[in-house]
């Protein structure tokens, strides 16, 4: 119950922020030259005046900005995200269609990066300045310094073109009609390369943070005390050090869950995945205001809820925080 | 025994008639590699998401690439650019050119089972082409009514003469028919059939998964008996060019149409025996890279400066070294790929740096102390690697003759707004698309009187009453020979004036996996029906 009240309070306090973001973005996009009809005409490679006027009327762009903004906010109050210009259907549907792929990609990349990062971070910290540490730290640096599109393309060249082990892009085998477990395996095959590509950079960050905070916690008094009273090394690491060293990584995850939602445009484009990042990019280029604002709205909600969960996990890891 | 033997005979008969057909086809110039195999799925690269899939409302290659397999136009063009019957079987015009009669194909049904009739043609022409279709509304501006004396005759009545050869050359792109019974009485632009098209074509629409793929499957009731060969076509939406190349190389994609791969990859794939990299099948859709001058800048309003700019550009060098040979020096508004209209011996401005400098000096723009004459802002359109390279090349070349060029980049909407609506440019560079006849989408680049903001039209602050008159006369001239002569006169006039310059002439490049046969066999092949396309397995 207390958790629910807390959640409600959180949500309520974020409403003004949300409104400012949406109105700000709306006005910001007015500054961008051209509207969605211009973008459409550019895509078509030709259009005449009559058609352009007809389309402006169709998309409601013939009204003054203030009126458009008023209409938008009024719809938002009624929890209506409006109609997408690129897709010709309600924004809610467009986003819901894309959400599963995004969450799947993000979820798998984030968990892979999290667990692998922690494991590697612990190994590096335990063998600090020995060869495993050097190897892991160097790899981390390489992962961190390499742009993800390059990783993606190289992955495609090696695994899809040369070895033909994995598909070069897409979300699942088109028209194969798989169901149940077959479908899950099929999608998993398609997600291996994008997940690894997206995860590597985050993995590099987590492992470095983990290594650093492990090293720091290892020098603290309570660790020495634990060792002094004869606790086994395994138990010292898992029960005493790890728990404390995890806090910074958890903080980071909370922060990055937001960026990961929007930050995968590159990976989604390279692997032709139908995710939210590409949708957001597309809606900026196509000046599809409703869709873009809708994505911002949904992302904001996701960030708020992830941060809420992070708070709960904090309280779990460190009883001093409540 | 008998019942077993008979199918063999039939098969032999079929085979024999196929080889007779093959012989006939090779005589008529087409390539037939082997006996067509039935079935199979072809995967096609789709490099951008489409808002609607209705070619009667949207004239664009992206829309045709998909919908031309599902819906059909009245006429199409064959490999030589000659109009071929599709939904119309014959056509005729009256001496005054104001009435054009189409006889329509009988026994054609829509994918939902309803019969195709002249009512569909009438509805599409009046409610879609005339009202909403880009270029269509200009083409059909003087269309007054479409009469339907019977179910298979459609009579187009114009208030001004409409040259039959112009209409026939325009209709393959601007003549797709939509089903009246689906659209009538609805909000046409919001009709769900715009994204789930219903047509008469060889393939039936199945599914459009946004951001992923579009599927169409074989129409068993297609009017051309025995066609199509393929079971399915899947268009895969891949926006990243490198990823698209990877898809072609890994065999996940069979066709990459409309120059959708990086230039370097095209050059590489050209040497790969598994693929054919060709401009064949794109003759009807020529593209020229433009130099659009803003005549409101006093320097550019001077004809000597415009000519000097063209003289300063080594276009042959650019085509060879930057475009990997996928392009050649442009010679004017009508490309060489349009032999019906291409005029010989028109004024040209070959690469000559000394002459460029002399012209600039003569115009009174001497080099200053820093070696610069004046500076201009160049806006490259964002739709193509070649434009970006070209802009840099122009910058370097003009720098060489003392004109300082600042490149200003925008995204698509920004480019169109700045160039055509706000006139906020000195030189802009993008693509002009030539669509089979100069009257369709070429003369608007030169004719005055376009509404401000209308893209790809004369927004240069330049006009010529003489040229306007030639354009208007040619658009309603009924005699093909006289029309041709008028367009030669037009090219001569604009090549002399250089209000804008069509610097490079290119054709779209198609990359096809060699397991496909019967491809690229019409002048607008990626935008055609593909009923005869088959895949070797």
Image (cartoon, coloured by chain):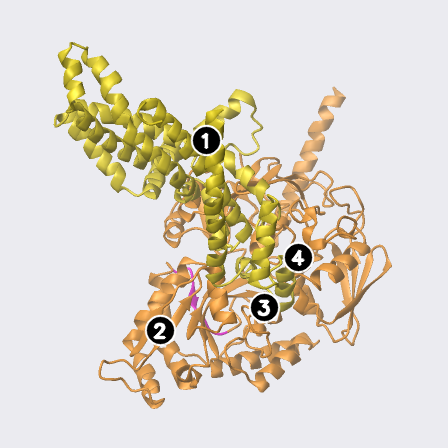
Chain colours: A yellow, B orange
Residue picked out by circle 1:
A6
Mark yes or no: residue B177 visible: no
Q: Chain of mark 4?
A: B
Q: Is there a contact, CB below 8 Å, between mark 4 and mark 1?
A: no
Badge 2 crowding class, 10 Å Cα cut-off, few under 14, some 14 to 19, many 20 or more, is many
- Taking the magenta stretch, the answer to whether it contains residue B259 is no
> Marks 2 and 4, how far apart in space?
39 Å
Res. B401 image quadrant? bottom left
Residue situated in front as seen by the camera: A154 or A65 = A65
Give the x, y percent position of residue B65.
Answer: 58, 51
Between discs 3 and 4, the one toward the N terminus: 4
- On the image, numbered disc 4 is attached to which residue? B57
Compare residues A98 and B496 and report the one nearer the observer. A98
Q: Is the C-beta separation of discs 3 and 4 under 8 Å?
A: no
Q: Which mark's residue is nearer the viewer, 3 or 1?
A: 1
Res B90 label: none
Q: Which residues are magenta?
A: B325-332
Quarter of image, res B2:
top right
The chain letter for the residue carrying disc 3 is B
Q: CA distance from mark 3 to mark 1?
A: 62 Å
Q: Is residue B38 above or below residue B52?
A: above
Instruction: For marks 4 and 1, give the one nearer the viewer.
Output: 1
**Do circles 3 and 4 both sit on a common chain?**
yes
Q: Determine the main secondary structure of the stretch shown in magenta.
A: loop
| Residue B441 badge | 3
Crowd rating for badge 4 (residues with CA inside 10 Å; few <14, some 14–19, many 20+): many
SS at circle 2: loop
In this view, the mark in front (2 or 4):
4
Q: Is residue A202 visible?
A: yes
């Amino acid at each position: 119950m207390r958790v629910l009240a807390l959640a409600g309070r959180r949500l309520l306090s974020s409403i003004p922020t949300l409104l400012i973001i949406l109105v700000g973005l709306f006005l910001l996009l007015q500054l961008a030259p051209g509207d969605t009809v211009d973008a459409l005409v550019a895509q078509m490679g030709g259009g005449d005046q009559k058609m352009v006027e007809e389309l402006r009327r169709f998309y409601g762009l013939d009204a003054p900005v203030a009126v458009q903004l008023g209409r938008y906010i009024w719809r938002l109050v009624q929890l209506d995200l409006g109609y997408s210009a690129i897709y010709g259907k309600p924004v809610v549907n467009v986003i819901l269609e894309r959400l599963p792929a995004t969450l799947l990609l993000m979820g798998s990349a984030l968990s892979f990066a999290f667990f692998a990062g922690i494991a590697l971070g612990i190994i590096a910290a335990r063998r600090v300045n020995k060869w495993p540490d050097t190897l892991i730290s160097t790899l981390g640096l390489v992962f961190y310094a390499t742009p993800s599109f390059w990783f993606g393309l190289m992955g495609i060249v090696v695994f899809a073109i040369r070895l033909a082990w994995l598909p070069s892009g897409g979300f699942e085998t088109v028209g194969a009609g798989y169901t149940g477990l077959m479908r899950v395996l099929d999608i998993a095959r398609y997600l291996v390369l994008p997940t690894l590509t997206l995860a590597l950079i985050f993995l590099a960050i987590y492992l470095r943070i983990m290594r650093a905070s492990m090293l720091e916690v290892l020098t603290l008094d309570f660790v020495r005390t634990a060792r002094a009273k004869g606790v086994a090394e395994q138990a010292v690491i898992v029960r005493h050090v790890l728990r404390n060293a995890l806090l910074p990584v958890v903080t980071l995850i909370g922060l990055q869950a937001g960026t990961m939602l929007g930050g995968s445009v590159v990976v989604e484009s390279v692997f032709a995945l139908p995710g939210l990042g590409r949708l957001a990019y597309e809606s900026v280029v196509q000046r599809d205001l409703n869709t873009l604002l809708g994505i911002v709205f949904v992302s904001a909600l996701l960030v708020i809820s992830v941060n809420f969960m992070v708070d709960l996990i904090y309280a779990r890891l460190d009883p001093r925080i409540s | 025994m008998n019942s077993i033997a008979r199918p063999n005979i039939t098969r032999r008969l079929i085979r024999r008639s196929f080889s007779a057909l093959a012989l006939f086809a090779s005589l008529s110039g087409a390539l037939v590699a082997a006996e067509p195999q039935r079935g199979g799925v072809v995967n096609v690269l789709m490099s951008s998401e489409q808002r609607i899939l209705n070619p009667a409302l949207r004239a664009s290659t992206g829309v045709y690439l998909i919908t031309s397999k599902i819906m059909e136009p009245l006429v199409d063009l064959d490999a030589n650019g000659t109009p071929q019957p599709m939904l119309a079987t014959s056509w005729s015009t009256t001496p005054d050119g104001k009435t054009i009669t189409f006889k329509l194909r009988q026994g054609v049904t829509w994918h939902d089972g309803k019969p195709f009739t002249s009512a569909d043609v009438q509805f599409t022409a009046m409610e879609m082409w005339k009202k909403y279709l880009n270029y269509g509304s200009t083409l059909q501006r003087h269309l007054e009514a479409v009469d339907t004396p019977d179910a298979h005759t459609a009579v187009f009545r114009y208030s001004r003469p409409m040259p039959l050869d112009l209409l026939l050359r325009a209709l393959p792109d601007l003549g797709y028919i939509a089903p009246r019974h689906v659209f009538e009485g609805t909000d046409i632009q919001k009709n769900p059939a715009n994204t789930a098209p219903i047509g008469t074509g060889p393939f039936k629409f199945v599914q459009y998964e946004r951001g992923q793929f579009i599927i169409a499957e074989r129409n068993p009731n297609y009017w051309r008996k025995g066609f199509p060969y393929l079971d399915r076509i899947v268009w895969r939406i891949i926006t990243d060019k490198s990823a698209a190349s990877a898809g072609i190389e890994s065999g996940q994609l069979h066709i990459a149409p409309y120059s959708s791969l990086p230039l370097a990859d095209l050059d590489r794939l050209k040497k790969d025996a598994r693929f054919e990299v060709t401009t064949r099948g794109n003759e009807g859709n020529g593209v020229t890279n433009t130099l659009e001058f803003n005549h409101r800048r006093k320097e550019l309003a001077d004809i000597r400066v415009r000519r000097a700019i063209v003289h300063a550009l080594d276009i042959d060098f650019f085509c060879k070294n930057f475009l990997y040979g996928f392009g050649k020096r442009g010679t004017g508004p009508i490309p060489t790929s349009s032999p019906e209209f291409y005029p010989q011996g028109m004024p040209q401005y070959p690469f000559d740096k000394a002459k460029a400098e002399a012209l600039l000096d003569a115009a009174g723009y001497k080099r200053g102390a820093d070696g610069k004459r004046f500076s201009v802002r160049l806006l490259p359109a964002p739709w193509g690697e070649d434009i970006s390279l070209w802009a840099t090349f122009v910058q370097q070349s003009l720098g060489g003759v003392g004109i300082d060029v600042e490149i200003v980049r925008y995204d698509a909407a920004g480019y169109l707004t700045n160039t055509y609506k706000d006139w906020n440019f000195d030189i802009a560079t993008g693509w002009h698309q030539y669509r089979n006849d100069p009257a369709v989408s070429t003369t608007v680049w030169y004719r005055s009187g376009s509404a401000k903001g209308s893209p790809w039209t004369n927004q240069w602050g330049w006009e010529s009453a003489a040229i306007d008159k030639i354009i208007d006369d040619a658009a309603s001239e009924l005699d093909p020979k006289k029309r041709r002569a008028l367009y030669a006169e037009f090219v001569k006039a604009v090549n002399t004036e250089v209000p804008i310059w069509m610097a490079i002439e290119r054709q779209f490049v198609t990359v096809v996996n060699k397991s496909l046969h019967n491809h690229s066999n019409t002048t607008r092949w990626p935008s055609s029906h593909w009923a005869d396309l088959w895949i070797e397995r």
